[in-house]
């Protein structure tokens, strides 16, 4: 999944029209806007960001300035602070970017959307359902590029890509269980994993207790309601270091499983539950065999 900063931009902004361009901004150069080709050809690590919106090129051919007045069309929406402030979404993204250790941005590519108001309203709904940070929802928002330098020295890296996955914004929102027309007070219809789990729901979660009893939990409950676990399919992971194991997650009370490894992209919560059932059966069978032996 090797992507350069330039190929990333080309793929995300594949459906540009003649009068618009993606913009890239260098935070170390006073947030100066530059043409992607120039900014990205510079191989020195830099804190580079891109706007989710392609910007309209002014008629005199000068560079557009960053801002809503130059908005032309949105090509991607990004969920910010996944894994720290917001829970891991169960809707598979077009890409996952690790921006600092353990902090992820989930990108979902959309068909070009010309209406900044519709974009912002949809993002607002996603934020209300705790799928993203409320501060990262505007139609020209800047997000880090792959290869972007963090102040800690960490360089952003793509850990998952599926650039074939591009859908209308509305379709993605439906997959998240978020509807534009949904009144703020009506939460009864929404039963997605973004809902906070109650202590009662966690206490009643048999799968969670089984994971605990079998010492498969590697990191305790985080603020977003997820625990890190050992992935049952670790042997299929391409990276087998201990650090990579932390990417598998389980959400107690909501019974949701998610593993970030390429080999696990197709695994669902159902696969995970099936695996546990098989493990339980195997354990019971072994116990029965041991009992028979001791009687013999
Ligand atoms: Zn896995």
Image: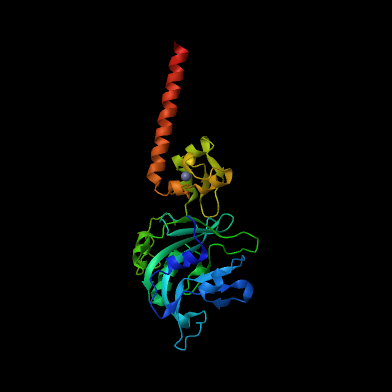
When asked about the image quadrant of residue 278, the answer is top left
> Looking at the image, is 60 positioned above or below residue 228?
below
**Colour pattern of the rendering:** rainbow
When asked about the image quadrant of residue 281, the answer is top left
Viewed as shown, does residue 178 lie left or right of 203? left
View extreme (bottom): residue: 60
View extreme (right): residue: 152
> Looking at the image, is 67 positioned above or below residue 3?
below
Residue at horizontal 45 percent and vertical 62 percent from the top: 107
When asked about the image quadrant of residue 275, the answer is top left
Of the 4 image quadrants, the one containing the C terminus is top left
Along the viewing direction, whichever of 150 and 188 lies nearer the viewer: 150
Residue at horizontal 52 percent and vertical 82 percent from the top: 65
Residue 50 visible, this orientation: yes
Along the viewing direction, whichever of 56 and 287 lies nearer the viewer: 56
Image spot of residue 75 (x, y percent): 41, 70
Image spot of residue 46 (x, y percent): 61, 67
């Amino acid at each position: 999944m090797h992507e350069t900063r330039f190929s990333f931009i080309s793929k995300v902004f594949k459906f540009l029209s003649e009068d618009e361009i993606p913009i890239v901004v260098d935070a170390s150069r006073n947030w100066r806007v530059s043409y992607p080709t120039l900014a990205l050809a510079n191989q020195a690590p830099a804190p580079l960001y891109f706007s989710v919106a392609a910007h309209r090129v002014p008629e005199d051919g000068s560079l557009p300035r960053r801002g809503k007045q130059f908005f032309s069309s949105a090509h991607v929406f990004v969920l910010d602070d996944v894994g720290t402030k917001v829970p891991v979404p169960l809707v598979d993204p077009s890409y996952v970017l690790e921006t600092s250790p353990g902090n992820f941005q989930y990108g979902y590519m959309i068909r070009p959307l010309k209406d900044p108001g519709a974009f912002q309203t949809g993002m607002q709904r996603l934020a209300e359902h705790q799928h993203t940070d409320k501060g990262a929802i505007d139609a020209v928002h800047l997000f880090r590029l792959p290869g972007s330098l963090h102040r800690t020295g960490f360089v952003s890296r793509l850990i998952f890509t599926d650039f074939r996955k591009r859908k209308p914004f509305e379709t993605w929102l439906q997959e998240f269980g978020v509807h534009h027309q949904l009144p703020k007070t009506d939460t009864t219809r929404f039963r997605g994993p973004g809902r906070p789990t109650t202590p009662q729901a966690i206490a009643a979660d048999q799968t969670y207790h089984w994971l605990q009893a079998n010492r498969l939990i590697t990191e305790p409950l985080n603020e977003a309601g997820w625990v890190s676990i050992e992935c049952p399919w670790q042997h299929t992971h391409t990276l087998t270091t201990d650090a990579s194991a932390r990417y598998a997650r389980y959400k107690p009370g909501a019974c949701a499983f998610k593993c970030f490894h390429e080999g696990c992209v197709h695994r669902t919560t159902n696969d995970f539950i099936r695996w546990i059932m098989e493990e339980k059966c195997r354990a019971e069978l072994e116990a029965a065999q041991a009992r028979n032996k001791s009687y013999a």
